[in-house]
Amino acid sequence: MSDKSKRILFVQPGGDYRAAYHRLIETGTETYYGHRYVLSILEALLAEGEVAMMCCRTEERYVDVLPNGVTVIGAAAHPRKGAADIRRQMAAWNPTHVVVLGPMSPLIRWAIRTNRRVICQLADSFNYGMLTLLRKHGLLARLLNDRRVEWVTNHGVNACRSLAGIGVDPDKIIAWDYPHVRRPDDLPPRTDGGTGGKGLLYVGTIQPDKGVGDVIDAIAELRRRGTPARLRIVGAGQVDRFRALAEQRGVAGDVDFLGLVTNADVFALMREASAIVVPSRHVYPEGLPLTIYEALCARTPIIASDHPMFSGHLVHRKSALVFRAGQATELADQFTDLLSDPDLYARLSESAPETWRRMQNPVKWGDVIRYWIADDTASRTWLSDHRLEAIAGTGSVEIRAPLPSR
């Protein structure tokens, strides 16, 4: 029986779960992987009480109840600049439990000060530079270490290590993952050496720190070498800025901006590509990009930057090709090496299932929420058993000293 005294509010910076729900109902498709899963978790939690998902940066303000009973709230406000407005909307819904889906300090602080039960679910990594640590991340760490923030979770073990690196107590950190419906074993390895593919594919937010400009520069470098290649970019963001950059570099005809497409169509594009590029710069707060999982399932080789969050998952010339972040010439070199070495191409495609299996985490996003809400002895024990501190000595996780900033 539902305990209607529980009012569970999720708050995330962007997105629009009202639109995501109706898209799934009307077309059966999702633009971002995980929408279907998160909506299913929200619906299941209705057995525990009232449930609402607030998305901060929606285009319009609304409060609706979906046909499945979940409340969706569009705050139409920036989570930092409009924090006071968002807090008022949170107070109006009057939650007993608050799940803050991102390092949104003003909202976490509100939940603490108003005596709500609160956890923070992240998909972010954190720069270890001393100035950043002191000015920004140190303040966040102190907030997350408040005893009233019951758990701090993050997408992947490396991202959890970065939390410990800025001073968050590893005794309250849990690494999570999404469940994955695809597996690399579903498809045969690629044997075409990539020569029959359609060049490089980038999937993600279109902005400088994600390395989009570095890929365009690599395309220009390849053209200068007399080995032109195509680049397809999937995602939303600063499209005009990077379309102009492609024009400036003389490769506008080699770069296609495809916009947002369904997750199913993204996967088809991955299978068609010669290689998937994940060029994130170190300053971008990656967790563990789902693009990597999906690329492995497509059996298409990955060319990735040496972002700290990829460390241990992507090993150069064994599970991917790795270049120094921000180095477009190195990225071009890796693409050239990949297409000129059919054996390397085949090995990377062949290794995808093992790489994918090593990346799996049995703790799923919804598990943490479900056990936290249940709050019985067995649930509390489960959460405690999956702490970063608890598993650090098992060989599954190594808590390491902070990495130097670049």
Image: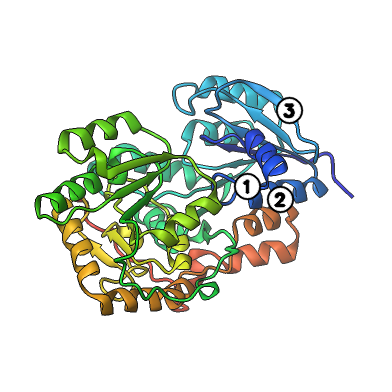
For this view, does 36 lie left or right of residue 297? Answer: right
Q: Residues within 10 Å of mark 1 (few under 14, many from 20)?
A: many
Of 109 and 11, the residue lying toward us: 11
Q: Which residue is mark 3?
A: 64
Front-lying residue, 161 or 356 = 356
Amino acid type shown at disc 3: Asp
Colour scheme employed for the rendering of this structure: rainbow
Query: Could you tell me if the residues under marks 3 and 2 are in contact, i.e. CB atoms within 8 Å?
Result: no
Q: Furthest-front residue in view?
A: 196
**Tag 1 secondary structure:** loop
The residue under label 2 is which amino acid type?
Answer: Ser
Residue at numbered disc 2: 40
* Image quadrant in which you'd find residue 364: bottom right
Amino acid type, residue under disc 1 in the picture: Thr
The single residue placed furthest to the left in the displayed view is 225
Mark 2 packing: few (<14 Cα in 10 Å), some, or many (20+)?
A: few
Can residue 212 be seen by looking at this rendering?
Answer: yes
Q: Earlier in the sequence, mark 1 or mark 3?
A: 1
Q: Which residue is mark 1?
A: 29
Tell me the residue at 17%/51% (across/down): 328
Mark 2 or mark 1: name the one nearer the start of the chain. 1
